[in-house]
Image: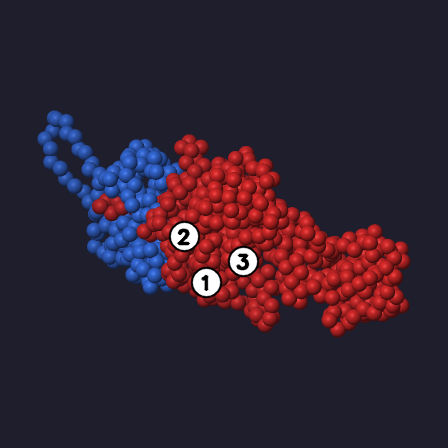
Chain colours: A red, B blue
Amino acid sequence: MSSDTENPIRHGSEGGIVARLPNLESLPLAVAPNTTDEKNTLRAPLVPVGCMCLFDRRFAFDCSFVQPESSAQFSELKALIDELSDPKTGRRPPLSLFGHADPTGSDDYNKALSGRRARAVYAVLARKGPIWEDLYTAPLGGDRWGPAFIQTMLKTVAAAQGDPSIDPGAADGVAGPNTQAAVEAYQRKKGLAVDGIPGPQTRGPLYLDYFDSICVGPDGKPYTVADEDMLGRGASGGKGSYQGCSDFNPVLIFSGAEHETFESEQDHADRDAANAPNRRVVAYLFKPGTKADPGSWPCPVSTDGASACRNRFWSDWKARRAYGVERRLYEETPDTFACRFYDRLASGAPCEHGEELAVIRVRLFDAGFNPMPSSPFRLTLDSLTVAANADQNGWVEARVPSTPAQCKLEWGEGDASGSYAYTNTICLDWAASPTDGMTQEALSNFGYGPSDGGGDGDESEDSGSGDTMDPLARFQLDFQIAAEDDAKSTLDAWQADPDQVKPMPSVPPADDTDGSPAGDDGSDGSPPTDGPGGDPAGHPDAEQSR
Amino acid sequence: MAKIYTVAQGDYVASIAADLEVRNPDTIWNDPSNAPLKSARISPNVLFPGDAITIPDPRDRKEGRPTDSIHNFAVLRRHVQLRVVLHDAGDRPVSGAQCLVELGARARLTSDGGGLIAAEIDPAGAHVGTLTIGNSNCPLDGQYEIRVGHLNPVSKPSGQMARLNNLGYRAGDLETGALMDRYGPNDPSDPIPPLERMRFRSAIEEFQCNMMGPSAVDGICGPQTQAKLKQVYGC
């Protein structure tokens, strides 16, 4: 059916896919000759020619806010639009956006949530500030927009416009003095009333500046996709232009056993991370000249319920949505979509592919081996930074693309400048260590790093005798153990239940005034938890860069 | 002695008549021995490969004319048309499209207010040619291979598939359709990939949903769906 001679182009920026679809050759038309007023009817098909997928992490966690990193995909999208435009008429390929949720929660809730993400992307492309204001002021479930997004927008606009005065610093969600100053600077710049509060009058222009900062073509110039270049051509409610597909079209369906395991867990973080590929927004670009007729377009608008979607379900939709013996991937067994209409659009498209995420769980301790409930932290991985607070037991949980070998973690209240008390490079890939358990990496995660690193936060205390000893010796000294085997079992026990096993420092360092062990911050770097069946580090990225 | 002719893909009664030098196709179609075929196929233009059709013996015809003058005898050949209606994706007729039909001869045509183009075609001429559509202001623009006489009866999977393809439902290629005529889905030697069967079924379901309502969707092209398909397609 599809031409093998022209491979679809797949752009490899991480966080999404932008691709051409394989050229569908026109099928020969079998027609009847006519000797009466009978006729043959040729009807224009709906032919997608290109697609874009924005992965889950291009949106804020559980939220419809479009992250600044999406600019990579928006740039590639502009290139694709130009490539697929009709060279003779200059007509552009109209596009339609489809939001997808994961199969947890009710269909209607997922429909609304997936519709919000599709709406949010539409608003970026078509520069519809009021849609973002609506998303901001009308939260739905976990999709709550807050101060962190104001900070992110200001920071992004500051970078794009080269104006550091409106940069609020870290997007930590805390509206502190830096944020207020940045908002005031922005208000002055825009000729607004200066009160430092990002109210609706300020947010309106900020959305548009933000759109212009992230929706930029390869030439560095902002571009828009106007309503006439949307498939629905500005029909009310975005009919034909953007819609939410609820959880009806997952690219991954767990096996029954996986599903049961995930559901039996109290914490659904693993399930939600494994489900990340399903949470995505896909845009289809159609042959130039294609129009959706709002009257016959099958998808309900994004704010309507899911019932009209069911009219378009495959007759065997129940089997398609069921958890089977094996995990099913759309790419391998294209039978995971319940919506027939969407399934037909997607047929042969290289964009129906998500990105599996891994969960990193780390527990934060202070230098005295006490857990640090609600401690602020900042986790940095290559290009990704997560800044938030630990939970009430001091646990940090972050979803990250693939399983990294290590990350930089900063935590604990620092001084007034907003810095953190502790810094450590956390090894996450224990499985790759030559020996199990008692390794340099494990000790380093505990704060017993090589003597020149590790306890950045309290280096003054590091000047004691421990500083010249190797990490294992310092650990053994602190825990009053001699043999390496004992050290390993202590370490293992402490990792299993740090509330029960307390270190017993043998000799408190002379210069230690607060009673904490010398020169060490404690942290428990648990090995990262892959999604079920997840690949080791790097594979998803390798996949995208093909 | 009357001959029995076995229909091949692409034959229609007028083309068979032209090939076998039968002046009037109606003498074939209306021959009493073809009555069962006529009632099964209904249209002389939509036959199925393998159909057996009786070709009656030629009859002598006597014309009396005086000698010593020139007489012209013209053979009246029934003309055949190719009538195609163009619709956009919203089922509205596309008028003003510039079309070129090339079946041996070339015909330039512009679709009328009802989206119709009607080209005169020669039953003795080529069956396979091209249809080029331009200026349709919708994604119909392009060049298509056109196979006249290859539309099979709507009761056959190949005929259903061809009509669905032409109606924009992309149900599968014609070769797959021919295989589906021969192999049922439960045939152990079914050579058709499951994906192709799924594509065909999805086209049927989409057609049912659009034209007969969601409650009619069952993925099976039964008698009611066949009748609807024939009505919507036009033959």
For residue A519, side relative to residue A68 (left or right): right
Q: Quadrant of residue B74?
A: top left
Residue drawn at the location 45% of the way across and 36% of the way down: A85
For residue A197, say whether it is visible: yes
Q: Quadrant of residue A183?
A: top right
Residue type at numbered disc 3: Asp
Chain at numbered mark 2: B
Residue type at numbered disc 2: Ala
Q: Secondary structure at mark 2?
A: loop
Residue drawn at the location 25% of the way across and 42% of the way down: B114
Image position, residue A292 (x, y; %)? 36, 47
Dot in front, 3 or 2: 3
Whether A129 is drawn above or below A89: the answer is below
Residue type at numbered disc 1: Tyr
Q: Secondary structure at mark 1?
A: helix
Marks 3/1: CA distance? 13 Å
Image position, residue A395 (x, y; %)? 67, 64
Q: What number is the disc on residue A109? A: 1
**In the depicted view, which residue is nearer to us: B122 or A241?**
A241
Marks 3/2: CA distance? 38 Å
Judged from this view, the residue extending furthest toward the left is: B66
Q: What number is the disc on residue A62? A: 3
Q: Earlier in the sequence, mark 3 or mark 1?
A: 3
Reading the image, the residue beneath label 2 is B171
For residue A206, say whether it is visible: no
Q: Secondary structure at mark 3?
A: loop
